Image (tube, helix red, strand yellow):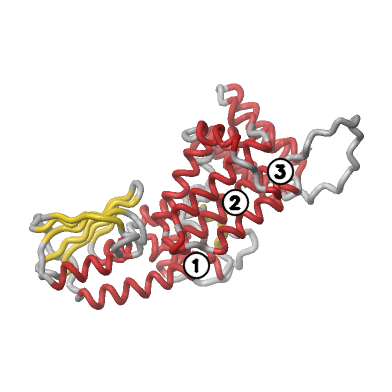
């Protein structure tokens, strides 16, 4: 016998209680976007779990934080050798505690796809625990939290607990992992196209959260986007919307659904759903970002407005990400030169060299994205 359904409609705790009460034996298989896990039940008791490279209790707690996804229980399926001795009751109590703790961690970390970087003004006399040292020694300012957790063989939750302390003590910082985002395509969008894309991104996050888990922070992210959009910071506005929406999804549904959200955003940005975005032409734009109506009067010169202050750190970070995206590990020396550039003139010089090299090897799209960043420095 097998039964299946949605975790949004039947939470994992209810599934486990149903199986336990009837003392059944079998395997619960969970699917969440591209993630998969199993919980093995032996005569009603949780006996084993797997989630990616994790096994045992760590895997169970990772799966217990899933609030969305699909499940299937196959009765009398062969179960693996027991790796979990803790009672069902204590496992579920600990899982509930970890869910509450994750919500607090997510407020500071936001997303497990954030890249860990060293804070330039960190104290040189700080003492680290063995767990903190294990993470610090794996920080290369390229890998995100998910990748570092996998390298350590630890759960994302346990890794984030340690990372939270390192962020609080200002040993480490965070920056966006832009490797998956086709930034060159985003830069080529018109204002109207970008606005439609922003509404699609907000819709995707709202669908994941649904009415049961709707977050006021998600609507706040859209308001922030509109404010930045109207101030002329259109590109930054879209990246900030993605980051804040992912943070909302992560804080409520956990890191797996945050990854599912970002995967769908990548499809949107990369053209996988571009036809749907283009077909949204009949959909009215939000009044706050409606483009100005054409005027029959002769155009007049616009009054010069004060330019927003140059965010050198953000430009440096984007240039480093783009250079790494185009050159890969072999271009590490170019990335390091960019990251060490302290003044705009120095950054302009080293990033121009990276752009020229990318053009020589045929990476014209990435070179064009770097060219756009250089325009902010000129």
Q: Secondary structure at mark 1?
A: helix
**Vertical position of residue 135 compared to residue 195: above or below:** below
Percent position of residue 16, x then y: 21, 67
Name the N-terminal-most of marks 2 and 3. Answer: 2
Q: Can residue 53 be seen from the camera position used here?
A: no
Could you say whether the residue bearing mark 2 is in a helix, strand or loop?
helix
Residue 290 marker: 3
Q: Residue at x 65, y 27 (%)?
A: 356
Q: Are marks 2 and 1 in contact (CB under 8 Å)?
A: no
Distance from Cα at disc 2 to Cα at disc 3: 18 Å
Residue 356 vs residue 34, the one in the foreground: 34
**Helix, strand or loop at disc 3?**
loop
Name the one closer to the observer, 266 or 279.
Answer: 279
Q: Which mark is residue 164?
A: 1
Measure the C-alpha gap from mark 3 to mark 1. Answer: 40 Å
- Tell me the residue at 80%/33% (across/down): 294
Q: For the C terminus, give its image quadrant.
A: top right
Which is more foreground, mark 2 or mark 3? 3
Query: Closer to the camera, 46 or 319?
Result: 46
Give the residue at mark 2: 241
Disc 3 versus disc 1: nearer the observer: 3
Lateral position of residue 226 relative to residue 211, left or right: right
Label 3 Cα neighbours within 10 Å, binned few <14 / some 14-19 / many ≥20: few
**Residue 320 in the figure: left or right of residue 98:** right
**Location of the N terminus (image quadrant):** bottom left
Compared across the picture, whether 161 is left or right of 319 comes to left
Residue 301: % across, % down: 91, 35
Q: Is residue 275 left or right of residue 26?
A: right
- Residue 283 locus on image (x, y percent): 59, 40
Q: Nearer the viewer, residue 308 or 201?
A: 201
């Amino acid at each position: 016998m097998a039964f299946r359904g949605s975790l949004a409609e039947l939470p994992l705790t209810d599934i486990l209680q149903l199986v336990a009460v009837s003392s059944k034996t079998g395997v619960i298989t969970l699917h969440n976007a591209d993630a998969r896990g199993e919980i093995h039940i032996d005569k009603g008791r949780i006996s084993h779990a797997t989630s990616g490279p994790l096994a045992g209790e760590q895997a169970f707690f990772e799966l217990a934080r899933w609030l969305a996804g699909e499940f299937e229980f196959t009765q009398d399926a062969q179960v693996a050798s027991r790796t979990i001795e803790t009672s069902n009751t204590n496992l579920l109590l600990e899982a509930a505690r970890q869910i509450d703790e994750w919500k607090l961690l997510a407020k500071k970390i936001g997303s497990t796809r954030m890249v860990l970087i060293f804070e330039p003004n960190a104290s040189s006399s700080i003492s680290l625990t063995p767990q903190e040292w294990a993470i610090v020694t794996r920080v290369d300012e390229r890998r995100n939290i998910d990748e570092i957790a996998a390298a350590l063989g630890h759960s994302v939750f346990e890794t984030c607990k340690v990372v939270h302390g390192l962020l609080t003590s200002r040993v480490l910082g965070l920056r966006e992992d832009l490797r998956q985002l086709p930034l060159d395509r985003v830069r080529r969008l018109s204002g109207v196209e970008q606005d439609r894309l922003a509404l699609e991104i907000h819709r995707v996050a709202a669908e994941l959260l649904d009415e049961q888990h709707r977050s006021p922070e998600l609507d706040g992210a859209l308001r922030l986007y509109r404010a930045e959009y109207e101030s002329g910071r259109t590109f930054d506005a879209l990246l900030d919307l993605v980051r804040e929406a992912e943070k909302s999804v992560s804080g409520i549904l956990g890191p797996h659904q945050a990854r599912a959200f970002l995967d769908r955003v990548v499809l949107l940005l990369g053209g996988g759903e571009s036809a749907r975005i283009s077909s949204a032409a009949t959909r009215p734009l939000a009044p706050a970002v409606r483009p100005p109506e054409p005027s029959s009067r002769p155009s007049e010169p616009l009054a010069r407005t004060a330019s927003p202050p140059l965010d050198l750190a953000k430009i440096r970070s984007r240039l480093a990400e783009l250079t790494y995206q185009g050159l890969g590990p072999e271009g590490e020396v170019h990335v390091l030169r960019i990251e060490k550039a302290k003044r705009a003139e120095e950054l302009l010089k080293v990033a121009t060299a990276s752009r020229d090299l990318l053009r020589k090897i045929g990476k014209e799209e990435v070179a064009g994205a770097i060219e756009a960043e250089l325009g902010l420095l000129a």
